[in-house]
Amino acid sequence: MLADPRIAELVARCGRRAVKTAVLAAQDRVRNGEIPPEEAVPSALASLPPIHEPVINATGVLLHTNLGRAALSPVAIDAITVAAGPTDVEFDLGSGTRARRGRHALAALTEAVPGAEAAHVVNNNAAALALIATALASDKEILISRGELVEIGDGFRLPELLEASGARLREVGTTNRTHVSDYAAAIGDETAFILKVHPSNFRIEGFTAEATIEELAALGPPVVFDIGSGLLRPESALPKEPDAATALSNGADLVTCSGDKLLGGPQAGIILGRAALVDPVRRHPLARAMRTDKVTFAALTATIRGQEQTPTFRHLRVPVSHLHERAHRIAAALPEIRFEVVESSATVGGGGAPGVRIPSVALALPESFATPLRTGNPPVVGRTEHGRLLLDLRTVDDEHDDAVIHALREVDRCT
Ligand SMILES: *Cc1c(COP(=O)(O)O)cnc(C)c1O
């Protein structure tokens, strides 16, 4: 079996030991009569540990954290391939000397957000906040509203992350209402900065109040604004979502955000703002432990330069009429399957635009399709709602429609 060309090719990719284990297990299954001999090779192939399975995201959640958030744009994917080899990530080819690491990405960021004097990139937004707290506030106080003490996901909480840096949190205001006077009353010698956190995964409605960035900027201490989702400029489709350019022009001294949310790039934590604050942050010893990989820098640079072409923005802006056409084309290709084309609501997800519903179109199928589609080839992940499986087309690329048709046909044939 090891001489089978399909298996031999895998030895190069997965290593001889893993492939041999899979082959022996497949042979055992043949001997035990579990599978016929001609199934041995496919069975061995299927049992090898995958690297990552590509998945079709039909959940209607644009940035699904469990599916890896933003899908990269073609230019970002090309940039990753180029950066995979030796590259000038930290080297100036003209002078032949060391250069600022990731300077192409940093230049792209400060070009895209002219209000930012300087930029720094770490491995995610949580790291950006931890580094800022450590460099600017250890043994000092960070003022934060009680309405912004956020749990970001998987049990991780921003207040605990900030305190792990040695900074003390000074909570001000209440859950629903915090006024600029609450911050003003708490400012003292110990204040390192005021932190504003965008409530990116929940909404507080009703009797609410919060201080604006302009009001906070007038108080004196530096204002750090965690905008969460990484819009560099305002986006008309999401009018309530904060963006870096507006935050800085309103008076924030530092802005932090993720690279893999609405920016549509690789996982990264972006810090933008005043050079006098960015410099101590990037020079702090811990910055070295959060250093960004060359591949990430390359993808980030390409993402920022080609902002309008990320799959995230394309999916956000596709007209509903186009989704209808695609749904009916898929339905027409599969007359043997009974499903309905239904109105649906997509969401941004991944900590962005909470409560915003984006009109969409879905194929509604019996719920029994969910598991075979998810474990099929390619895996198609939808969402179940009221006892039905919905395949929401807003988050599926046009070019994957045929793969969806194929996957549905396979499931229909086997059930
Ligand atoms: C998502 C989010 C974070 C965490 O960002 P990561 O890049 O996942 O570390 C922090 N703050 C806010 C407001 C967020 O939305």
Image (cartoon, rainbow, N blue to C red):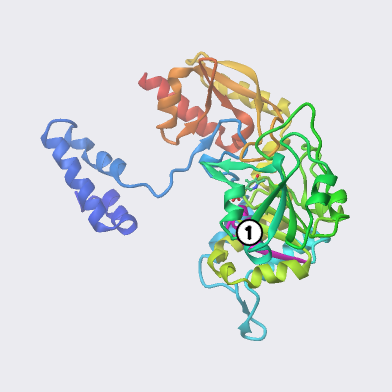
Q: Residue 205, how many percent across, how many down?
A: 75, 28
Three-letter code, disc 1:
Ala
From the viewer's side, name the closer residue of 407 and 114: 114
Q: Residue 128, how many percent across, how many down?
A: 63, 58
Residue shown at 67%/58% (left/top)?
Answer: 270
On whether residue 125 falls in the magenta region, the answer is yes
User: From which residue to which does the magenta span run?
Assistant: 118-132
Q: Residue 30, how many percent across, how many down?
A: 15, 36
Quadrant of the image containing the C terminus: top left
Left or right of 281 in this view: 116: right
Left or right of 1 in this view: 367: right
Answer above or below: position of 112 versus 397.
below
Q: Residue 188: which quarter of the image?
A: bottom right
The response on whether ligand 1 sits within 8 Å of label 1 is no
Q: Residue 301: which quarter of the image?
A: bottom right
Answer above or below: position of 377 versus 279.
above
Which residue has dot 1 on it?
167
Left or right of 70 in this view: 10: left
Q: Callout 1: 10 Å neighbours few (<14), some, many (20+)? A: many
From the viewer's side, name the closer residue of 192 and 337: 192
Residue shown at 87%/49% (left/top)?
Answer: 215
